[in-house]
Image (cartoon, rainbow, N blue to C red):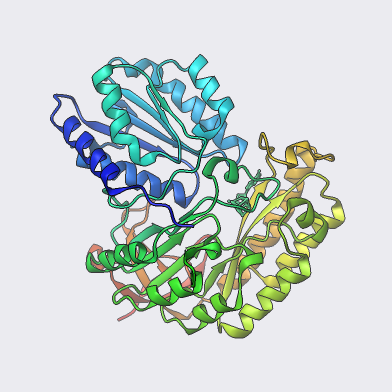
């Protein structure tokens, strides 16, 4: 279903941005983004609005007059971290005349709001995932009326278009195509924090990507909690969208995350196979290799069905590879269930496995299930899975040695300024020595060694 915020409402927000811009205030902001790519993309929208108001970004909260926490609640440790970070700001808030804003998925949780109301009186603005576009209005209210502004909606917010965006990268961009999830996997908090599925209009997505291409972007990552439930119209689905994006000149790589295996239909497989730009690395969240656990997770597929899907995609898309998400220690997971997960990991030979220890989320169905697994067993299983996944990644990486790869150069390595970093078309990180003017270009690199998380290469002419 497509629901879009009215253009009058968006104009309204531009008015608030103008009003704040005219105020005599100090304008340095720091944004702390936790969690997934969707949150990163939301932060780019928050940054876009703040830049429009005349705020400048700083890398340190100590220098900031405005701090935004864009939070994640998918697992418990993410939640704990943010309260620690909030505490650290208490003492510098007054000195910097600082406004503290709390946004993102955690602010959609009632117990979190209660905790902030009671124990963190120095948090000034709380807004949720549904009303992000109203940030200028809320900020204006806080500054002008100097009172706390709490605005979190229970109902699903509408898709908004036309507000500014300040992107982190200049070659690769995230583009949200849909938001929300209708699946209610029993462990997952997302359907409660992001609401039901809403899709953007195809023309809005296509125009955004065309503009990115005009501005020199080479790669887009299409985002949604369940991208293959995208519905752009009566007869327009994710396969149609992939085909239309593939026609856009200048975009060399199109990635997407995350699809749901149960909704991965033949038309999408064909669109991937026939496209020139859609990446042949597919992120296909497995979650567990045991049919019994998958059933308890409400995933809608069995171990065999997942393997059949992988086979089907392999048959139709030459050179395809897979990455995945796996949760270990789901309530009731037996040793045999876990062995099934190891078995499927061996069979599919994933390029990369993102592994998570099951974390209880308040209000989900799994919270009330029997057979919660002791932490010690969960972490032992996690380590066993990691060992296997690392070994497979290593074996897959060895296949790259002595090959020549086309690499899109992304920038300097975070840990060594003399080294450049980029990614192969199969999304492998490659580090190599090279001149900074190569950033943004596609070059040929010969792979010389592998280091599990990255490959080392040498530029060839
Ligand atoms: N505990 C552990 N991992 C989780 N994920 C989602 N919910 C939980 C949870 N309660 C993982 C899933 C999902 C990824 C984004 O996070 O593997 O695909
Ligand atoms: Fe969560 Fe499942 Fe929806 Fe993914 S598909 S966001 S895991 S409920």
Q: Residue at x 72, y 61 (%)?
A: 300
Does residue 406 appear anywhere in the picture?
A: no
Picture layout, residue 144 above or below residue 184:
above
27 left or right of 402 in image? left
115 left or right of 358 in image? left
- Residue 391, quarter of the rendered image: bottom right
Q: Residue 144: x, y in percent?
A: 24, 20
Picture layout, residue 357 above or below residue 178:
above
- Residue 67, quarter of the rendered image: top left
Does residue 194 appear anywhere in the picture?
A: yes
Q: Residue at x 34, y 37 (%)?
A: 134
Picture layout, residue 74 above or below residue 235:
above
Foreground pick, 222 / 136? 136
Q: Residue 326: x, y in percent?
A: 67, 55
Q: Residue at x 30, y 65 (%)?
A: 207
Picture layout, residue 232 above or below residue 244:
above
Q: Residue 188: x, y in percent?
A: 64, 45
Q: Residue 75: x, y in percent?
A: 61, 40
């Amino acid at each position: 279903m497509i629901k879009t915020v009215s253009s009058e409402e968006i104009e309204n927000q531009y008015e608030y941005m103008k009003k704040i811009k005219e105020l005599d205030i100090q304008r340095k902001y720091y944004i702390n983004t936790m969690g997934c790519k969707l949150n990163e993309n939301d932060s780019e929208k928050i940054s876009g609005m703040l830049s429009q108001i005349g705020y400048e970004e700083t890398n340190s909260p100590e220098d900031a007059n405005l701090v935004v926490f864009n939070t994640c609640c998918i697992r418990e440790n993410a939640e704990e971290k943010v309260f620690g970070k909030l505490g650290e700001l208490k003492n510098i808030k007054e000195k910097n005349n600082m406004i503290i804003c709390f946004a993102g998925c955690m602010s959609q949780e009632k117990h979190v709001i209660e905790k902030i109301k009671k124990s963190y009186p120095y948090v000034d603005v709380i807004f949720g995932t549904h009303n992000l576009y109203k940030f200028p209005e809320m900020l204006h209210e806080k500054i002008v009326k100097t009172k706390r502004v709490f605005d979190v909606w229970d109902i699903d917010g509408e898709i908004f278009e036309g507000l500014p965006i300040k992107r982190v990268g200049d070659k690769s961009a995230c583009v949200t195509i849909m938001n929300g999830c209708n699946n209610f996997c029993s462990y997952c908090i997302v359907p409660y924090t992001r609401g039901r599925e809403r899709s953007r209009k195809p023309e809005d997505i296509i125009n955004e990507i065309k503009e990115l291409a005009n501005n020199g972007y080479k790669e887009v990552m299409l985002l949604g909690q369940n991208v293959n439930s995208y519905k752009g119209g009566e007869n327009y689905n994710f396969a149609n969208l992939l085909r239309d994006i593939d026609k856009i000149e200048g975009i060399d790589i199109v990635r997407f995350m995350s699809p749901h295996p149960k909704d991965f239909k033949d038309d999408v497989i064909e669109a991937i196979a026939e496209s020139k730009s859609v990446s042949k690395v597919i992120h296909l969240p497995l979650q567990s290799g045991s049919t019994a656990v998958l059933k308890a997770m409400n995933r809608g597929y069995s171990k065999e069905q997942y393997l059949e899907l992988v086979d089907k995609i392999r048959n139709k898309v030459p050179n395809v590879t897979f990455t995945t998400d796996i949760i270990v220690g789901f309530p009731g997971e037996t040793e045999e269930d876990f062995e099934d997960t190891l078995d499927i990991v061996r069979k599919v030979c994933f390029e990369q496995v993102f592994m998570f220890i099951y974390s209880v989320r308040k209000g989900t169905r799994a919270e009330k299930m029997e057979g919660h697994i002791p932490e010690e067993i969960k972490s032992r299983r996690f380590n066993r899975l990691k060992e296997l996944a690392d070994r497979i990644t290593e074996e897959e990486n060895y296949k790259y040695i002595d090959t020549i790869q086309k690499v899109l150069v992304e920038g300097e390595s975070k840990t060594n300024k003399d080294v450049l970093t980029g990614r192969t078309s199969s999304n492998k990180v490659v580090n190599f020595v090279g001149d900074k003017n190569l950033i943004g270009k596609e070059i040929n690199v010969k792979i010389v060694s592998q280091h599990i998380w990255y490959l080392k290469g040498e530029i060839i002419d």
